Amino acid sequence: MTTTANDLGSRCDLLRSLHQPGAPLVLPNAWDAATARAVAAAGFPAVATTSAAVAAALGYDDHEGAPAGEMLAAAARIARSVDVPVTVDAEAGYGMTAAELVAGLSGMGAAGCNLEDTHHATQALRDPARQAAWLHAVRQAASGQGYRLVINARIDVFIPSAFMGAGRARPG
């Protein structure tokens, strides 16, 4: 299936409408087209990619260990395989400019994305002002293209490490 610009706008709007105060949106993660189809077949209204599993399926480590082009190509296969909106774990942006990232996400059919607030080399949180400026630049780049990209907030930094398993404090 191919996604036209109009379809992509509709998927962005649908994903945005699923975010309702008091009713958290559960976004099951897929790492390939087969798992995306399984998530959609189970009745979930949207699919999310997972950087850790997609990178592992491609033979790389998480935390931007996989080349951006390979990750976006994998996400594109996922988006083409389902009729529901797909939101992409775009790590910390793979070192791309906001315009490059937005072009990649738009081109592969992402209705949404999440952008991590971590320096992967050190696992330290980014400076909040710099992260806010980065998110603003991504929003501006998308808006400038008429692309209604949904930027999802991550909550894993608020989940106690006891729930993350084996001492892992932050997932990818």
Image (cartoon, helix red, strand yellow):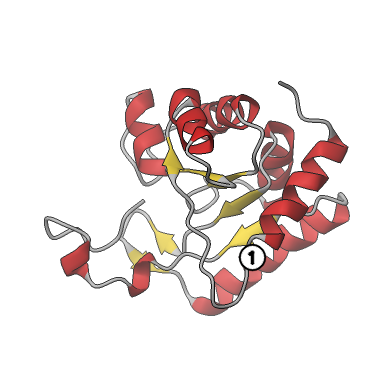
In the foreground, 28 or 135: 28
Which residue is the site of mark 1? 135
- Say if 114 sits above or below 51 in the image: below
Q: Residue pushed farthest left?
A: 166
The answer to whether residue 104 of the structure is visible from this angle is yes
Q: Residue pushed farthest top?
A: 1
* Residue beneath the point at 54% across and 36% down: 40
* Residue beneath the point at 46% across and 31% down: 38
- Say left or right for 24 vs 137: left
Q: Quadrant of the N terminus?
A: top right
* Residue beneath the point at 53% across and 66% down: 153
The picture places residue 15, in percent across and down from the top left corner, at 67, 54
Identify residue type, mark 1: Leu
* Residue beneath the point at 64% across and 26% down: 80
The answer to whether residue 67 of the structure is visible from this angle is no
The picture places residue 160, in percent across and down from the top left corner, at 24, 73
The picture places residue 19, in percent across and down from the top left corner, at 62, 65
- Say if 115 sits above or below 60 in the image: below
- Say if 98 sits above or below 23 in the image: above
- Say left or right for 43 vs 3: left
In the foreground, 89 or 18: 18
- Numbered marks: total: 1
Q: Secondary structure at mark 1?
A: helix
The picture places residue 114, in percent across and down from the top left corner, at 54, 56
In the foreground, 92 or 3: 3
- Say left or right for 38 vs 111: left
Rate crowding at label 1 as few (under 14), some (14 to 19) or many (20 or more) other CA atoms within 10 Å. Answer: some
